[in-house]
Amino acid sequence: DGWLRYASLPCSHQCQSKLPASIMLLNVTETSPVYAAGSEIQDGLKRIYGAHAQISQIQCKTSSSTVVVGTVEQYRKTCGSSSEIPELEEDGFWLSTEGPKIRILGSTESGALYGAFEYLSMLAQGNLSEVSYATNPSAPIRWVNQWDNMDGTIERGYGGPSIFFNNGAIVDDLTRVKQYARLLASIRINAVVVNNVNANATLLTPENLKGLGRIADVFRPYGIKVGISLNFASPETLGGLDTFDPLDPSVISWWSNITEQVYQHVPDMAGYLVKADSEGQPGPQTYNRTLSDGANLFARAVHPYGGIVMFRAFVYNQLNESNWTEDRANAAVNFFKDLDGEFDDNVVVQIKYGPIDFQVREPASPLFANLLNTSTAMELEVTQEYLGQQSHLVYLPPLWKTVLDFDLRVDGKPSLVRDVYTGKRFKRKLGGSAAVVNVGTNTTWLGSHLSMSNLYAYGRLAWNPTDDSQTMLQDWIRLTFGLDRTVLNTITKMSMESWPAYEGYSGNLGIQTLTDILYTHYGPNPASQDNNGWGQWTRADHIGIGMDRTVSNGTGFSGQYPDEVAAMYESIDTTPDDLLLWFHHVNYTHRLHSGKTVIQHFYDAHYTGAATAQTFFTQWESLKGKIDDERYNHVLRLLDYQSGHSIIWRDAINNFYYNLSGIPDTANRVNHH
Ligand code: GCU
């Protein structure tokens, strides 16, 4: 159940008097989100407070305690106009618990369901206070991406096999899908792309489209639409054509036919997600067509049905490291900048938070400052691919916020990244967020109980990117582990310390996660970063380290930002220490603003980070008896592992740079091994 446990809480007489005796639904159709809202409230009241509320016919004038759920429009039709209800935007809701009549009214039925989950979240946190407020989403796109393969494996998935696919087909039993739908609806996610961006065309066979229809039927009552990833070469590989040229009429009509079939099975299909011309995936460049030609092909196919195309900006080529000015970080802007304005209105360019690939720290992708006439979405990664793969506790929102809150200063004006992708800064109607989630059949969903805070907070941020990291975390802790203060304080402390600790023992000063980048993306392997074509380089030798991304002497990447930001990163003096090695190649003896040398910072940060990670285990041990044994032991085992693995990280990285630089650790730890 994740954070939807509805664990039992004590309820005094006064508390009982505040609980509704009935639930009045403004739509009782079983497949409607309003109906789902009613069942959730009924179930939640019973499980949290042992209270029985009947679902009943709407009575507008009732004076007995009740909760009314539906859309504003349904409410007005049934009960007449009500001036108290504020104007709502699409999917927004108004929650008023100023009883006896509690009202949960959405601008849409999904909004009503979100309001119901909000009310339940209050109840489950023991909060029975009287509130009355409206809330609206920051953006219309609040999606998750699953990287599930048709054979049931999941790319970069650490929570077991797929809940959707097995053996090339859709699984028969979709019980887990329904559970996932509840979780996603409770954090106001409105679409899920069910298959891997490295897509297999066989999802489009008639049999599998039928299965997709079943998946969509399960998500629909929760206000969640289904989307799919496409393989660009499908007309050839699946359709038997001799081309997949996006401008070829036979290809255009093939996609339009397939799209019609998709919508026959899934009439409200959200749209397509496309990874093209990247990491071996086929794309329009095979035919010398532009990426916008590729995106618009699908945009036109889904347009009649109201669908959209999420087109990924993660496009780059293999590079030659012996050329000092080659830089993978430059790729997205190089590929997309000149296409600004060329995309159809229902295309959204989906951009990873940083220019490389979900690293422990990256500067904001400069593409957000280069697409002024194109809708964009932020791509985050809940699955901890480079960040410990759920075997390490790493609470991600503080990392995400370094990008979401970054001011790109386009045209010398405030241009927070979050205002760009939500459409506010450049006045785009579409926009929003997508996160790679990769839950699996593991009972913990992600493989670790504590990792679920990242999924929970992702949804909250997609709704409102200004939500505070610690506030979201603490809501999640109370919902997941109950109201005990020690539990709350301990998990808060561990989680808030976890990303800085991971950065401490993995990769510092913007050098990226020094993991094995060739295969596993797991464990320390600083040597793997260089001497390959992937372009996640550190350029470390025995004198210095870092990528020179300046315009004056390097790859020119810093020049992809608007002037003020470009000037800040161009100069070593104004580049923040935590991104120094991202932008500059310096000697190990270079002094940081902190006064330390780069190499000593490496040594110290690795010791401090690993030491902090070791406290997680002991902090968690203090919670024995306050959390059920099953979850307590599961988490304890992982934290025990993290304690040891953080030492392996520490020593592997420190020894590597000691051997490379020959510069001793002033505290005599590293060189004495
Ligand atoms: C990373 C990841 C791949 C994934 C790719 C993507 O490189 O390791 O597994 O396919 O990102 O986002 O497309």
Image (cartoon, helix red, strand yellow):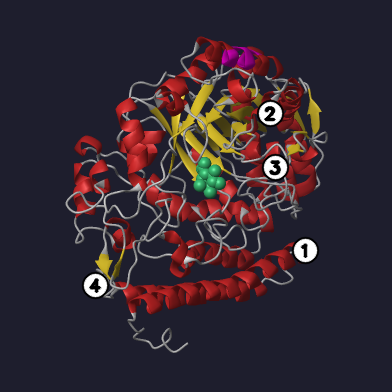
Percent x, y of residue 381: 53, 47
Of marks 4 and 3, the one in the foreground: 4
Residue neighbourhood size for the residue with mark 1, other residues' Cα within 10 Å, grouped as few (<14), some (14–19), many (≥20): few
Tell me the kind of residue under disc 3: Lys
What is the chief secondary structure element of the magenta stretch? helix
Mark 4 → mark 3, Cα distance in angstroms: 61 Å
**Residue 640: percent from the left, percent from the top?**
65, 73
Residue 411 on image: x %, y %: 21, 35
Q: Compute the Cα span from label 4 to label 1.
A: 48 Å
Q: As shown in the figure, which amino acid type bears the numbered disc 1? A: Glu
Secondary structure under tag 4 reads: loop
Horizontal side of residue 564 vs 504, given as left or right: left
Asked if labels 2 and 4 touch by Cβ distance under 8 angstroms, the answer is no
What distance separates the C-alpha of mark 3 from that of mark 2? 53 Å
Q: Which residues are magenta?
A: 254-260
Q: Amino acid at mark 4?
A: Arg
Q: Earlier in the sequence, mark 4 or mark 2?
A: 2
Q: Relative to residue 575, is residue 498 drawn left or right? A: right
Which secondary structure lies at badge 3? loop
Rendered image: mark on residue 202: 2
**Foreground residue, 407 or 31?**
407
Q: Nearer the viewer, mark 2 or mark 1?
A: 2
Q: Nearer the viewer, mark 3 or mark 1?
A: 1
| Earlier residue among tags 3 and 2 | 3
**Disc 1 target residue:** 630
Circle 3 crowding by C-alpha within 10 Å: few under 14, some 14–19, many from 20: some
